[in-house]
Image: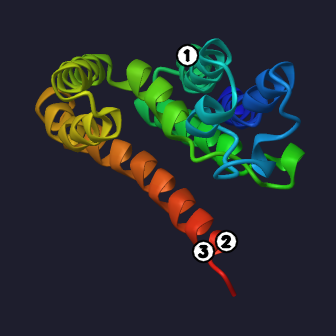
Amino acid sequence: MVQSIAAIVVAYLIGALPIANAVARRGGVDDLRDVGDRNPGFWNARGHLTPRLATLVFLGDTAKGVVAVLIAQQASTDWRLHYLAGAAAMIGHAWPATAKFRGGRSVLTWVGATLVLSPWPALFCVAVLLLWWISTRMFAYSVRVAIVLFPFIQLYRDGQWRTAASGVLMTLIGLRFLLAWRESRPR
């Protein structure tokens, strides 16, 4: 029990690591929350940093989910704890206590967690994303196609309970987007 709680706390702290802003400072941007869409994540980083630095943000935000779930897997064999650790990393990324609870959207942290939680469906969807992107040259739509396919592929491969747990993780992303939209609206 203590190991499980510790894994969740560590997952939150990993998610809260300000990787994007650490990289952005190397690129001359003090805080990604003050430029562009005000999101300290890859999509904003790619508009304000060099491609190399934006790639570091991409890898760092994805690694948050990977590492959080791997730590949980070391703490317990219970797949539910693994999903809770993924959720904790996503919450840490979206609402980091170290940054006045102003974080990113958690999309790449979800991707990282999903690569460990459900590797075959995740890799299948990455392949679909790449093929769709190559054929259409529209990255944003390619991502959407892959994300829409993921639950169906996961349901086939992992069953209903893990697919439902992934749905909860995806809902965290939706909640973060909704709250960001509400914050950006004129009053």
The residue positioned 56% from the left and 27% from the top of the image is 65
Residue that numbered label 3 is attached to: 182
Q: Quadrant of residue 50?
A: top right
Q: Position of residue 152 (x, y in %)?
A: 14, 40
- Observer-nearest residue: 168 or 58? 58
SS type, badge 3: helix
Q: Which numbered mark, 3 or 1, is in the foreground of this view?
A: 3
Q: Amino acid at mark 1?
A: Leu
Q: What's the distance in space between the residues labelled 1 and 2, CA to CA?
A: 33 Å
Q: Quadrant of residue 24?
A: top right
Q: Amino acid at mark 3?
A: Arg
SS type, badge 2: helix
Residue that numbered label 2 is attached to: 183
Is 98 on the left-hand or right-hand side of 109? right
In the figure, 180 relative to 110: above or below? below
The residue positioned 57% from the left and 47% from the top of the image is 105
The residue positioned 67% from the left and 71% from the top of the image is 183
In the figure, 92 relative to 75: above or below? below
Q: Position of residue 41 (x, y in %)?
A: 64, 37
Q: Are marks 3 and 2 in contact (CB under 8 Å)?
A: yes
Residue that numbered label 1 is attached to: 70
Q: Local crowd at mark 3 within 10 Å, few (<14), some, or many (≥20)?
A: few
Q: Position of residue 169 (x, y in %)?
A: 44, 46
